[in-house]
Image (cartoon, rainbow, N blue to C red):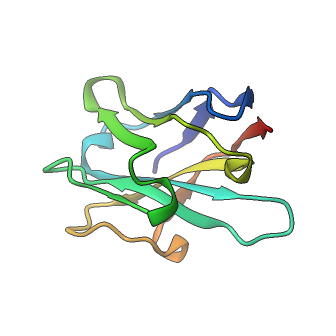
């Protein structure tokens, strides 16, 4: 079992930056693939980024490549999403997600078994 708590959302102007954090409870955080998803009003939840528990490899959706960076600190049970060059279309509720022990980086939200409550990111034009 793992519980996830996100923080760091807020209101930012286009072109600005934010860093989201997700703190996980539990002693086996280092064995979980961690992901970030987002859901804009009226849209389905979509994959943003993920990071592997073992080799720290990463995966991003095309729309955020070069602007967002996912990282993790296993000693702090925390995963981060550094967001730069933000655009109004990045406005959404951002969710942290976790899945235990996979050897690959899933993009399908159905593969993630644990979710945080979400944090709102609003980018003004």
| Residue at screen point 86% across, 68% down | 42
Give the x, y percent position of residue 125.
Answer: 80, 38
Q: Nearer the viewer, residue 96 or 63?
A: 63
| Residue at screen point 38% across, 42% down | 70
Q: Nearer the viewer, residue 63 or 41?
A: 63
Give the x, y percent position of residue 2.
Answer: 47, 46
For residue 84, above or below residue 57: above
Residue farthest toward the right in the current orientation of the protein? 42
Give the x, y percent position of residue 16.
Answer: 62, 27
Give the x, y percent position of residue 107.
Answer: 44, 71
Which corner quadrant of the image does residue 6 belong to?
A: top right
Q: Nearer the viewer, residue 114 or 20?
A: 20
| Residue at screen point 85% across, 60% down | 41
Query: On the picture, is 43 further left or further right than 36?
Result: right
For residue 105, above or below residue 36: below
Query: On the picture, is 13 further left or further right than 19?
Result: right
Which corner quadrant of the image does residue 61 belong to?
A: bottom left
Which corner quadrant of the image does residue 100 belong to?
A: bottom left
Q: Nearer the viewer, residue 12 or 105?
A: 12
Residue farthest toward the left in the current orientation of the protein? 55
| Residue at screen point 24% across, 69% down | 104
């Amino acid at each position: 079992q793992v519980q996830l708590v996100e923080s760091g959302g807020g209101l930012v102007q286009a072109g600005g930056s934010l860093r989201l954090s997700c703190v996980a409870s539990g002693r086996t955080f280092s064995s979980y693939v961690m992901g970030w998803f987002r859901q804009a009003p009226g849209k389905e939840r979509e994959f943003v980024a993920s990071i592997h528990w073992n080799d720290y490899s990463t995966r991003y959706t095309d729309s955020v490549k070069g602007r967002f960076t996912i990282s993790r600190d296993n000693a702090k049970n925390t995963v981060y999403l550094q967001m730069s060059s933000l655009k109004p279309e990045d406005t959404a509720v951002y969710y942290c997600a976790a899945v235990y022990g996979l050897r690959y980086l899933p993009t399908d939200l159905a593969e993630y078994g644990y979710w945080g409550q979400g944090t709102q990111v609003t980018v003004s034009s």
